[in-house]
Amino acid sequence: MTKNHSEYGITRTVRTFFSNYTICNIVDGITDKKSDALLRWMNENGICPENVLVIGAYLTGAGLSKALSKKSEVTVLDINPEIQNLLDPGVTFSCSIDEAVCRNYDMIIDTSGFGGIDPDDLLKLNRPDVLIVENPCSEGSDNFLNRFNRSVQLLRSSKAENKGILWTSGLNSKTSGTMTLTIDTLRRSMNDANKINGVLYSTTNMEFFERILFKEKNPDKFLKTLDKKALAVSSLAETDCDEIIDNNLKKINSTILDFRGDYN
């Protein structure tokens, strides 16, 4: 990252420092960690699928499908047609599970999370060699959230030869969702900035992003909103907003846990 842009505040004593990071950059940084974990696991296990189905296109699914499309033919299945705009042009999109049932996939990745694909629907698909399910919970999930976690149930229902759980942690977030982690990165970065000597306050371009996409059904506005500067800090002293964000992103870790039926 280049040096943070700054401007004078009400007087020339106070300056406002802006991050080069946009909110979209943070989203990409998190999905890159998840993609790297998946690709590393595939390489360690000699897995090279020709056809991949990713269930769920929202952020994590979009990021994983983009990474996998460089090596495999990738189809993304999601019930929300407007979400197609988040996908890489090289990825095929489908809204219909009936279409997916008619094809053979070497590898299936479920990123649909809470209330996502039903185990019975997953069984309708031709048996893949590999099944990866993203655990929607994280180390900060409460007992109520954990009761709605069906990742183990999905894996146990499958007869795939190789199974794994995509597990993401590090910020003690309530879920492992990319948007949850993005919001927590922003929130923690603001709190960290406020602890620095000379800082008056910090702010961020935070909105209820999901509503724009799923209620307003406006993917262009959603992407435009994510393209705003992630952090602004009002301070008497030089402040590196990108360093603050980096320190929080570095805490996030993703890995694939091999599943052999004994995970809990």
Image (cartoon, grey):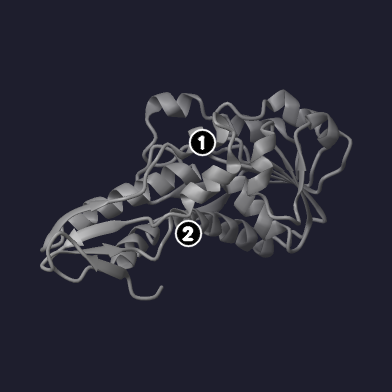
Q: Earlier in the sequence, mark 2 or mark 1?
A: 2
Task: Specify whether residue 185 is in view.
Answer: yes
The residue carrying pointer 2 sits among few (fewer than 14), some (14 to 19) or many (20 or more) residues within 10 Å by Cα, namely some
Please name the residue shown 67% across and 25% down the image: 118
The residue carrying pointer 1 sits among few (fewer than 14), some (14 to 19) or many (20 or more) residues within 10 Å by Cα, namely some
Type of the residue with mark 1: Ile
Decide which of 162, 168 is in the foreground and name it. 168
Residue 90 in the image, given as x and y percentages of width and height:
76, 56
Secondary structure of the residue carrying tag 1 is helix
Which dot marks residue 25?
A: 2
Residue 161 in the image, given as x and y percentages of width and height:
75, 45
Task: Specify whether residue 258 is in view.
Answer: no
Decide which of 55, 28 is in the foreground and name it. 28
Type of the residue with mark 2: Asn
Is the Cβ of the residue at disc 2 closer than 8 Å to that at disc 1?
no
Which residue lies under the disc numbered 1?
212
Taking 217 as reference, is 195 above or below it?
A: below
Please name the residue shown 67% across and 56% down the image: 66
Residue 237 in the image, given as x and y percentages of width and height:
15, 69
